[in-house]
């Protein structure tokens, strides 16, 4: 089967190629992709900032929706004709690993999930079933940005009505965290963000305090929860200061370059502050997918995708717009 795909051929070079897909293995699902989006993980893979890439040349992407065309042996989660969400998030099902696609006589690696392709072979444990009438554009966010933000806010915070949260960075994950914090009825939802368009969206989603980057130092020991969503090495080292002593908690959920080191003043930990990643507890997406889908129902995805929909041939333009801050999360129609 021939599939038009965006391939990372070498660092900073993406080519659209007609790839030849192999037959389905046990535990794999053949998906016809509908929509996909780009997050900072792909940007880092493309520009090489995740360190040495042993899989080049390879396909990309981990946040998409599509339709099942065929299932491999022993697949139980989905069947032909189902609408599905493709995700990297820890899920049940067979771990079928990746595939090798071909371009002429060259091997092209494809991970267990890959999304910038007309068709893709996806491992059963990287798939969630959607309803017949699910919105295939909005549901793209259930692949990466929404579960990352929702897991943090809905499953790892408590007594929110009495608490204050600070969200550093309002990209896709940060804005979904603002939305989730509003739904959780936090007493105060503060943000730090330099771009005006993102600030204005964050306010619409429920942020009730905007702190300028230069002023954030004044807010030491003020917040019950601090979410670091910037990926900025300077901010990640400072964010623990804004959490309250004796009970304040920091979640690190940004995307960091390879070899980024976290530098912490140990006194901050001695004062009873906690620091954690976004996936603090063992997480099973199958148990939470329907819940997260429900939480996402009232979210206006245009806040993240904007008005432009890119096609697959425009993926390099989408990436450029994303990095320049012209779009918060580019949506690609496959
Ligand atoms: Zn992602």
Image: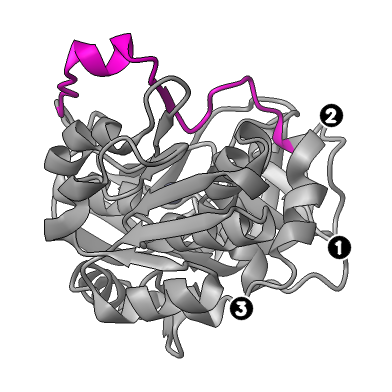
Q: CA distance from mark 3 to mark 2?
A: 37 Å
- Residue 286, horizontal then vertical, whole percent: 78, 36
Q: Is residue 274 above or below residue 89?
A: above
* Closer to us: 105 or 27: 27
The mark nearer the N terminus, 3 or 1, is 1
Q: Which residue is mark 3?
A: 300
Query: Where is residue 194 shown, x and y percent of the image?
Result: 21, 68
Asked which quadrant contains residue 96, the reply is top right
Q: Which residue is mark 2?
A: 74
Mark 2 closeness class: few <14, some 14–19, many ≥20 residues within 10 Å:
few
Give the residue drawn at x 61%, y 56%.
Answer: 180
The answer to whether residue 24 is seen in the rendering is no
Residue 248 is left or right of residue 87, and the answer is left
> Mark 3 against mark 2, which lies toward the viewer?
3
* N-term-proximal mark, 3 vs 2: 2
Q: Earlier in the sequence, mark 1 or mark 2?
A: 2
Disc 3 to disc 1, C-alpha distance: 19 Å
Residue 115 is inside the magenta segment:
no
Return the residue at label 1.
131
Q: Is residue 280 within the magenta segment?
A: yes
Circle 1 or circle 2, nearest the eye: 1
- Span colored in magenta: 260-285
Residue positioned 76% across, 40% down in the render: 288
Q: Does dot 3 land on a helix, a strand or a loop?
A: loop
Q: Quadrant of residue 76?
A: top right
């Amino acid at each position: 089967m021939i599939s038009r795909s965006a391939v990372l051929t070498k660092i900073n070079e993406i080519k659209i190629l007609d790839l030849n897909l192999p037959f389905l293995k046990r535990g794999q699902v053949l998906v016809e992709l509908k929509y996909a989006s780009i997050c900072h993980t792909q940007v880092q893979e493309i520009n090489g900032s995740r360190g040495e890439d042993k899989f080049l040349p390879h396909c990309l992407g981990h946040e998409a929706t599509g339709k099942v065309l065929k299932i491999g042996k022993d697949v139980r989660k989905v069947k032909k004709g189902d609408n599905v969400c493709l995700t990297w998030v820890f899920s049940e099902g067979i771990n079928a690993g990746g595939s090798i696609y071909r371009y002429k006589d060259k091997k092209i690696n494809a991970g267990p999930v890959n999304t910038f392709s007309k068709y893709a072979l996806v491992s059963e444990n990287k798939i969630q079933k959607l309803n017949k009438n699910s919105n295939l554009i909005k549901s793209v966010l259930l692949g990466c940005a929404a579960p990352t933000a929702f897991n943090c806010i809905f499953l790892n915070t408590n007594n929110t009505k009495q608490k204050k949260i600070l969200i550093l960075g309002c990209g896709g994950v940060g804005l979904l965290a603002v939305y989730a914090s509003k739904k959780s009825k936090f007493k105060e939802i503060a943000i730090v963000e330099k771009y005006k368009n993102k600030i204005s969206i964050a306010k619409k989603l429920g942020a009730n305090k905007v702190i300028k980057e230069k002023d954030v130092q004044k807010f030491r020991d003020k917040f019950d929860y601090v979410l670091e969503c910037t990926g900025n090495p300077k901010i990640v080292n400072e964010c623990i200061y804004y959490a309250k002593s004796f009970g304040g908690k920091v979640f690190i959920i940004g995307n960091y370059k390879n070899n980024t080191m976290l530098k912490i003043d140990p006194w901050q930990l001695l004062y009873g502050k906690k620091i954690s990643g976004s996936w603090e507890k063992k997480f099973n997406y199958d148990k939470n997918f329907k819940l997260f889908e429900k939480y996402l129902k009232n979210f206006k995805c245009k806040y993240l995708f904007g008005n432009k929909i890119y096609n697959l041939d425009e993926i390099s333009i989408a990436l450029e717009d994303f990095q320049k801050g012209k779009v918060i999360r580019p949506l690609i129609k496959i």
